Image (tube, rainbow, N blue to C red):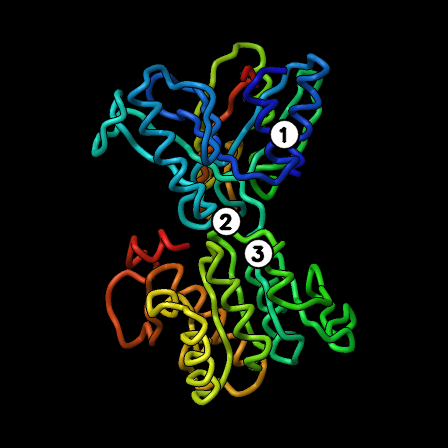
């Protein structure tokens, strides 16, 4: 079996990030590259074109996206001689939910609906049970901060801290800030938020780090029930990912699906 | 594990020739999105699909000829309209499918 196929198959088996790039129009038709975040194999004929393809593939791979790009014969942008189909193969992103309360059940359900691999974690064995969270992929009994130290977190991961008890919140949020997580949200009333922010500052967390925490969690849609709150959280995750702010499409004009900011994408 | 690539890897390990057909673009409505694929082996086995069953027979023939010739090809299938014997999609969409022999 040829090298490219062997590597592709292995990456899929290991659920590691991999993209394929295939020239589907223009010369050299049918040539293929396999691209990972830090390696690539195969060629489209010249190193300039390869470089442009690999760069574009990594960009798409980061968001798990699939698209066709158009380039010049030596990888020039704004030229259309060569069309390259780039397909990302990414394992599902991860959602970590801390605090095994009713709100966590709704967030775990909407997380699955959005395509996340969902883990619910709580230190209390009575609450952290598979029966209470049937849709979660994993239910962990343990201290949230201890668990998060060992969990796999990358830029596509989201962390929802729903415990709203400083005893649990502060250590797990500090640990969350040590990760690359694309979204960190913390539930709580205004009062809880102020109290928690003060404690985090006491523990040496900077303003810049605090800005990474979506607190109080969720978009302002007037949620009350666990389900409504889960929708507000899911909407915030989506909006921050795409760089949108929320609000009503009916009140606006312009493209609906456009990515608003590159900056927010790179934090993901 | 992606079942199509798993099968392709298995065929290539046995030295069975095969071709891969991948949806690369969907215009208007289409049943399956870009990246959906189907593979065909030289002895006529098929894994995966590229539409709701509308164009698979035609893609199968194209895959067989790609295995023979080694020539990759970008195919386009649109609305069937009045072409009684033409291959098309009932949903009103247009799909572009890239067919290639697995040489890599």
Residue placed under numbered mark 1 in the picture? A10
Residue A252 drawn above or below residue A176 = below
Residue placed under numbered mark 2 in the picture? B91
Query: In the image, what residue occupies the spot 57% across and 86% down?
Result: A225
Residue A38 drawn above or below residue A94 = above
Mark 2, other Cα within 10 Å: few <14 / some 14–19 / many ≥20: some
Q: B7 or A142, which lies in front?
A: A142
Quadrant of the drawing holding the N terminus of chain B:
top right
Q: A184 or B92, which lies in front?
A: A184
Mark 3, other Cα within 10 Å: few <14 / some 14–19 / many ≥20: many
Same subunit, tags 1 and 2: no
Same subunit, tags 3 and 2: no
Between label 1 and label 2, give the one nearer the viewer: 1
Where disc 3 sits, the SS reads strand
Q: Position of residue A23 (x, y in %)?
A: 40, 24
Residue placed under numbered mark 3 in the picture? A94
Query: In the image, what residue occupies the spot 52% across and 56% down?
Result: A157
Q: Position of residue B95 (x, y in %)?
A: 45, 39
Query: Hey, which quadrant is residue A57 in on the image?
Result: top left
Where disc 2 sits, the SS reads loop
Q: A182 or A175, which lies in front?
A: A175
């Amino acid at each position: 079996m040829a090298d490219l196929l062997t590597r592709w198959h292995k990456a899929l088996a290991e659920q590691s990030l991999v993209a394929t790039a295939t020239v589907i129009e223009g010369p050299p038709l049918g040539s293929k590259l396999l691209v990972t975040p830090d390696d690539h194999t195969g060629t489209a004929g010249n190193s300039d074109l390869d470089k442009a393809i690999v760069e574009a593939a990594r960009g798409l791979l980061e968001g798990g996206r699939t698209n066709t790009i158009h380039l010049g014969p030596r990888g020039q942008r704004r030229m259309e001689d060569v069309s390259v189909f780039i397909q990302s193969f990414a394992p599902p992103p991860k959602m970590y939910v801390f605090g095994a309360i009713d709100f966590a059940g709704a967030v775990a359900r909407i997380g699955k609906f959005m395509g996340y691999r969902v883990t619910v974690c709580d230190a209390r064995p009575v609450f952290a049970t598979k029966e209470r969270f049937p849709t979660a992929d994993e239910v962990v009994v343990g201290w949230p901060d201890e668990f998060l130290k060992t969990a796999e977190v990358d830029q596509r991961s989201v962390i929802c801290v729903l415990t709203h008890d400083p005893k649990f919140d502060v250590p797990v949020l500090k640990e969350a800030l040590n990760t690359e997580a694309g979204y960190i949200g913390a539930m709580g009333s205004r009062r809880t938020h102020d109290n928690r922010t003060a404690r985090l500052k006491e523990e040496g967390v900077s303003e810049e780090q605090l800005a990474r925490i979506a607190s109080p969690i969720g978009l302002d849609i007037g949620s009350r029930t666990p389900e409504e709150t889960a929708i507000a959280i899911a909407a915030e995750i989506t909006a921050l990912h795409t760089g949108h702010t929320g609000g009503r499409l009916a009140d606006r004009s312009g493209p609906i699906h456009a990515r608003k900011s590159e900056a927010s994408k790179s934090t993901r | 594990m992606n079942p199509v690539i798993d099968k392709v890897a298995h065929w290539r390990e046995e030295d069975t020739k095969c071709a891969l057909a991948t949806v690369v673009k969907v215009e208007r409505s289409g049943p399956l999105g870009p990246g959906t694929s189907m593979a065909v082996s030289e002895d006529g086995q098929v894994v995966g699909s590229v539409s709701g069953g509308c164009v698979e027979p035609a893609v199968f023939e194209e895959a067989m000829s790609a295995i023979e010739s080694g020539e990759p090809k970008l195919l386009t299938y649109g609305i069937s309209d009045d072409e009684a014997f033409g291959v098309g999609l009932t949903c009103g969409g247009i799909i572009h499918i890239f067919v290639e022999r697995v040489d890599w």
